Amino acid sequence: MAKKRILLGCGGHAGVLRAVLMRSQLSIEGVITPDLKPGRCWFDIPVLGGDEFLTDKDAGRFNLVNGLGSLPYDGGRRKALFESFTAMGFSFETVIDKGVDRIGLLNIEQGVQLLPGAIIQNGTKIAENTIVNTGAIIDHDCCIGAHVHIAPGAVLSGGVTVGDGVHIGTGACVIQGITIGADVVIGAGCIVTRDVVAGKILYPARSVEK
């Protein structure tokens, strides 16, 4: 029996995933969210209820899609949701848009989301629950940790290692061979030319108006 696909969340990131799944002709059984009343529809998808809807269900009958986005200072809500449901035995579906360019051999774990226009090169490893957002580029032999968000337009050159829980902001660039420790935040537009130890925050140069 085919598993039923359930989308968690109804925000902007969930809307992107809905569109990605729709254009691959993959059906969504329902949406889990505390923000809407059960019985109504979100777009064309039935709202099933909050997280409690799944607490007494057979985990083997469902594939979950993590519709929570990831921001640097949101308390790790996306990670917490993933870990909570995997501890209950549920599996998360890997979502890969048909417009993603995957080149060569890749190792992609459960719950990874590769969004439109992303380019992933040979030898790259991407751990669970990571987002590679619209138009991001990951070159050869990179190793990306779990619960990472590589934001739209970010570029990682070859051989970059990224720890768990890292946020790489929109348009940031990381040169080849760099190691980024866990829980680092790299601000939008940063250019990273040396290793970054865990927990650090990198800010880009600020524009000055005259």
Image (spheres, rainbow, N blue to C red):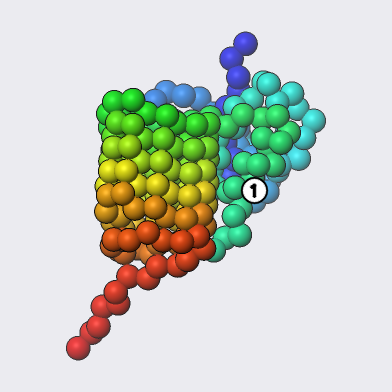
Give the image location of residue 190, x and y in percent: 31, 64
Crowding near the residue tagged with mark 1, few <14, some 14–19, many ≥20 C-alpha atoms within 10 Å: few
Tell me the residue at 44%/31% (across/down).
108
Location of the N terminus by quadrant is top right
Q: Identify which residue is drawn at 26% across, 78% down.
A: 207
Picture coordinates of residue 42, whole percent (x, y)? 55, 41
Q: For the point 29% across and 61% down, which residue is it?
A: 193
The residue sitting at 42% across, 23% down in the picture is 25
Circle 1: element type = helix
Q: Quadrant of residue 37?
A: top right
Give the image quarter of residue 92.
Answer: top right
Image spot of residue 27 (x, y percent): 50, 25
Check disc 1 and report the residue beneath it.
Answer: 80
Residue extending farthest to the top is: 1
Looking at the image, residue 164 lies above or below residue 30: below
Q: Nearer the viewer, residue 126 or 189?
A: 126
Of 35 and 9, the residue lying toward us: 9
Name the kind of residue labelled 1 in the image. Answer: Ala
Q: In the rendered image, is residue 50 in sight?
A: yes
Residue that sits furthest to the left in the current view? 210
Write down the quadrant of residue 52 in the picture.
top right
